Image (cartoon, rainbow, N blue to C red):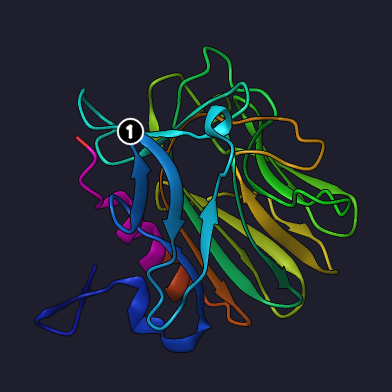
């Protein structure tokens, strides 16, 4: 998305509200093709999401089509663990991902790996589930069953100052909104506490903005995620 006449928006333009930026095809520490660390691209940050156990590591995609530079989770035991992040108020969170399940079901994109059990997950082919410290909120997609195998999506979630959660899928604001107050804890990629509900697919990028919300930010983030060169 163009800002003014000569600049292309990117997450770093939002200043210190950008809390985590796992950037596409960047800041990856590899052992062979396995991802040991995925470091945040936020300026001055030393935080990273990691996996010490070799058998639990996802791999980076270096060939093929539609997923280059992405981090591929096998849906069986792959996940990354990061520094605990607590979102107490407004936020905007975005994920660019590709599904590899034949039927998407309860696959967690980002979540909490401790007892709080917070998450963002694909409940099924037509619903997104989001759980804060309150009960899970389920969002129905405008066009029904849209989450297909081998398809890539941009998902952006925002919570406003009055605790209303809105979702954008591929830049389209979904009609279903839900209200959820309380903390939103995140420290895992590809799973939730248990460890369970593993994601089967490729995650290209994750952006999390803390203590801020606007439709402009959500729309800019959607456009940015959709513009990633993943082919």
Number of callouts in the render?
1
Along the line of sight, the residue nearer the viewer: 150 or 6: 150
x then y, percent, for residue 202: 42, 34
Q: Does residue 136 sit above or below 68 in this rendering?
A: below
x then y, percent, for residue 123: 69, 31
State the residue at coordinates (73%, 67%): 164
Magenta stretch? 220-230
Along the line of sight, the residue nearer the viewer: 209 or 187: 187
User: Where is the C terminus found, in terms of image quarters?
Assistant: top left
Q: Does residue 32 sit above or below 45 in this rendering?
A: above
Which quadrant of the structure image shows residue 39? bottom left
Which quadrant of the structure image shows residue 198? top right
Q: Which residue is mark 1?
A: 33
Judge whether residue 147 is colored magenta. no
State the residue at coordinates (82%, 62%): 180
Our reading of the magenta stretch's main secondary structure is helix
Which quadrant of the structure image shows residue 165? bottom right
Side of 202 where 212 appears, left or right: right
User: Where is the N terminus found, in terms of image quarters?
Assistant: bottom left
State the residue at coordinates (83%, 46%): 136
x then y, percent, for residue 220: 36, 68
């Amino acid at each position: 998305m163009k800002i003014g006449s000569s600049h292309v928006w990117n997450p770093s333009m939002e200043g210190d509200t950008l809390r985590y930026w796992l950037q596409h095809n960047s800041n990856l520490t590899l052992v062979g093709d396995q991802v040991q660390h995925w470091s945040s691209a936020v300026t001055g940050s030393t935080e990273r999401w990691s996996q010490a156990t070799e058998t639990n590591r996802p791999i980076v995609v270096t060939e093929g089509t539609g997923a280059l530079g992405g981090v591929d989770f096998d849906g069986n035991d792959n996940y990354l663990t990061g520094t605990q992040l607590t979102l107490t108020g407004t936020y905007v969170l975005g994920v660019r991902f590709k599904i590899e399940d034949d039927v998407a079901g309860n696959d967690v994109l980002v979540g909490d790996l401790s007892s709080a059990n917070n998450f963002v997950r694909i409940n099924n082919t037509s619903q997104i589930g989001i759980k804060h410290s309150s009960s899970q909120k389920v969002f129905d997609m405008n066009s029904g069953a849209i989450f297909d195998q081998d398809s890539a999506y941009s998902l952006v979630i925002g919570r406003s100052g009055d605790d209303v959660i809105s979702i954008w899928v591929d830049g389209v604001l979904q009609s279903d909104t839900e209200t959820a107050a309380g903390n939103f804890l995140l420290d895992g990629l590809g799973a939730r506490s248990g460890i369970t509900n593993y994601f089967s697919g490729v995650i290209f990028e994750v952006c999390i903005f803390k203590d801020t919300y606007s439709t402009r930010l959500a729309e800019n983030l959607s456009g940015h995620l959709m513009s990633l060169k993943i082919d």
